[in-house]
Image: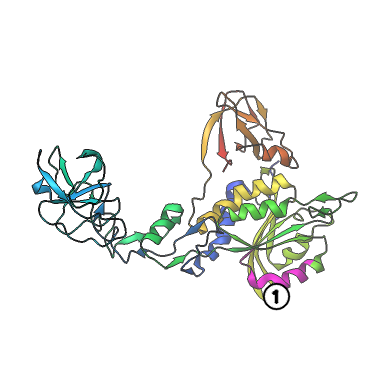
Amino acid sequence: MHPVGDDGRMRTVADHQLAIAQLLARLSTRESELWRGFPLPVSSPSRVLAADVVTPIDLPPFDNSQMDGYAVRSAEVAAGVSFRVGSRVAAGSLAGSLEPGMAAPIMTGAPIPVGADAVIPIEASTPDRFQPEDGSRRVSFEEPVAAGTFVRTRGSDLAAGAVLLPAGTRLGAAQWGVLAASGVTEVALVSPLRVLVLSTGDELTAAGSPLEPGKIYDANSVSMAVALAGSGAVVSDVLVVPDDADHLRELLGERLGSTDLILTTGGVSKGAYEVVRDVFEGAGVEFVSVAMQPGGPQGFGTATLGGRSIPVVAFPGNPVSALVSFEIFLRPALRELHGLLPDRPRETRPLADALDSPEGKHQVRRGRLNSAGEVELVGGPSSHLLHSYAASTLLVHIPLGVSHLDAHDPITVWSIDD
């Protein structure tokens, strides 16, 4: 029998993906964030432009040399003709001018002297090295040269006033570099969502504390925070919360002002100590069962708390369930909101060994490729096997309605080794 929502409706993975995307769609209208000057916002790994950026200058801003060599008047160059050697032109210097019958030693990136229209590399010169500046030097070239040779002309990369980077561009090393090269000091960035992470359960203990009997170290707060950062979001706070509804309400009242989204783990099933359900169900959050393993119990909705409405996404507490839920439901929606590619790289590969799966659920296993390029599973299907997840590079998808696959059968995998 397939799991169903609390309203009696069948809840498929696709249904819940759509529900989360629609829940977060209201956050797409947030204001952009203005960045001015340096230092760069390098603490966030994924920044995206909210508006076009126009270059205020030509790139490059002046004609300059592509090589170390000699700046010449191309019409004068012929085999056997020697030239008086002028003053050297260094990168960062003024261009100066080139008189007829002269060749000016020029360095890469240096401005082309007025009158010159080509550069001949030092390797194609006789002598093939720069001479001391003693006033009696001459140089010759074996072959003629065309105008424009080894000259980077002004605006050849981009002319002033043109769109340097369009809205929606993800800013990596090259993009930040071209902004700096253009002298741009102000850009509008897509504002990262601020997410409050709640890891719930009386059994949880923070790393570094003594582990008392019956307790476990909390993993979800760390894994969810890192996963959120990789999706463009900013974690506004991380709280490890006991199964105390009044205490949770008090904490929420203190932190809602700096939060766009609440992400919880644990407390979403139908047990006796389900603090997330106790606090959020009456506030407008819906709790359902999804036909997925792991990650069946889920919660989502807009909660009204302290006079404010805020989206809530609630995952199960088992660490693998929480991570799989994030990958399937929240990561794609968050990355799309931040202008990032939403989907993991995916492909179809043959299975290394046969497997069984519950026919009524979409099962997500963990795996990696063997030397033959086949998918081998890592660990079993249980939702507590976090080490097996950490040793995996793939999420392995066995769709709803499939109960058995043989070795070498094709299967869809998502790459998670980034």
Question: Pointer 1: residues within 10 angstroms few (<14), some, or many (20+)?
Answer: few
Q: How is the image coloured?
A: rainbow
- Percent of width and height locating residue 183: 37, 65
In the rendered image, the vertical position of residue 237 relative to residue 359, given as above or below: below
**Which of the image's four quarters has the C terminus?**
top right
Give x and y (percent) for residue 90: 29, 55
* Residue 63 position in % (x across, y down): 23, 57
Front residue of 5 and 105: 105
Drawn side of residue 141 relative to residue 244, left or right: left
Looking at the rendering, the stretch of residues picked out in magenta corresponds to 248-261
Could you tell whether 391 is left or right of 103 in the image? right
> At 40% across and 61% down in the image, what residue appears?
180
Of residues 153 and 317, which is closer to you in this image? 153
The residue carrying mark 1 is: 306
Considering the numbered disc 1 on the image, is that residue within a helix, a strand or a loop?
loop
Where is residue 267? Give x, y as percent.
77, 56
In terms of image quadrants, where is residue 179?
bottom left
How many numbered discs sit on the rendered protein?
Answer: 1
Q: Is residue 247 left or right of residue 131?
A: right
205 vs 372: above or below? below
Q: Going 24% across and 43% down the picture, which residue do you hit? A: 121
Q: Which corner quadrant of the image does residue 125 belong to? A: top left
**Residue 169 in view (yes/no):** no
Q: Main secondary structure of the magenta part?
A: helix
Looking at the picture, tell me which residue is in the foreground, 335 or 119.
Answer: 119
For residue 162, side relative to residue 239 (left or right): left
Quadrant of the drawing holding the N terminus: top right
Q: Is residue 319 magenta?
A: no
Q: Nearer the viewer, residue 273 or 359?
A: 273
Q: Quadrant of residue 123?
A: top left
Furthest residue toward right:
213
Residue type marked 1: Gly
